[in-house]
Image (cartoon, rainbow, N blue to C red):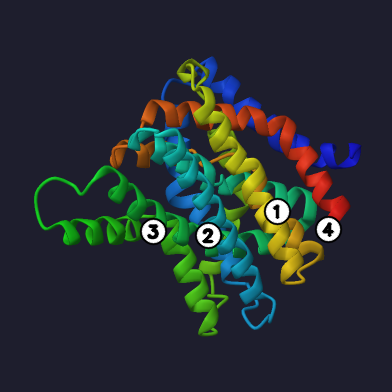
Amino acid sequence: MFSLSLSILPVFLLLMTGALCQRFRFPMAGFWGGVDKLSYWVLFPALLFSNTSQIDFSNPMLPRYAMILLLALVVTACFVFITVWLLKVPAPTGSSMLQAGVRFNTFIVLAIASSVYGDEGLVLAALGASILIPSINVFLVVAMVLMHGKPAGGDASASLSSLVSGALIRNPLIVSIVLGSGLNLFGLTPIVLLSDVLGMLAQAALPLVLLAVGASVRLEVIRSVGATFVLSSLARFLVFPLSIVVMCWWLDVRGLPALVAILFGVVPTATSAYALARQLGGDADRMAAYITLQTILAVVSLPVSVWLSQFYLG
């Protein structure tokens, strides 16, 4: 447990460093917003492209791996929908609960997988991200439009389809995954010079991204979030990982693939959830509070969860 905590500790020290830099406006006001954009549009896509372009898609375990993650997503979403219905939660709050439950911070997943499980763990984490990122984005856009009503003006079905297609096309993470996986499947990777350049950018991605994630934490947005935060966090930190454990047992997936899959269920929700909440009519202020509180909670819960997964699945 102690050695595991030491492996994870650098990730959280980088998060805390980013938060402190933002708090004291170091090196200048607005700097970390620029780093966040650089990470989202350049560094992180380079990391995902580099890893998905190296995945061995002939591995017979991959369909089971995808099934584990997607079924866990469905179970968690059902839990949130039932909770929202039973408590008669308003739609904007309900959609923010849904994002807090099913979204995951990809940056932290990849950082933990690399720190604890090495290069092989990082490749498996990139594979899981390539499965879940497109699936979650399509699911959330559709679910939020249906929960809040179609956008005003224009044909309703066209509005929904344009929102979904727009969310996919404009997402650099999805584009990089599609390009890396597609070129890999056609045997066109590695690409002379380009793969080397993207590999160098990928090496800079994780530390800068973690600093930017830490800088995005906003303690001032925390208000009385009450039961909705508790229930959405139960979905994120309990229902999602337990669903993965059950699916791993059912499909007989053990060892490193199971341990990396668990990471997707024990990290806090994604910081990008705030932008989607604002865009599609969710409760953005409450979403910001969920993101901040879950990130703080993960400092304690993540080492324990990873240790338990190693104990039972390792």
Q: In which quarter of the image is residue 255?
A: bottom right
Which residue is painted at 42% across and 41% down in the image?
85
User: Which x, y percent locates residue 287?
Assistant: 44, 32
In contact (CB < 8 Å): disc 1 and disc 2: no
Q: Earlier in the sequence, mark 1 or mark 3?
A: 3
Residue beneath label 1, please? 262
Which residue is painted at 39% across and 34% down in the image?
88
Compute the Cα span from label 1 to label 2: 13 Å
Q: What element carries label 1?
A: helix
Residue beneath label 3, please? 138
Q: In which quarter of the image is the N terminus?
A: top right
Let me know if residue 23 appears in the view.
yes
Q: Which of marks 3 and 4 is nearer the N terminus?
A: 3
Q: What residue type is labelled 2?
A: Leu
User: Which x, y percent locates residue 212?
Assistant: 53, 34
In contact (CB < 8 Å): disc 4 and disc 1: yes
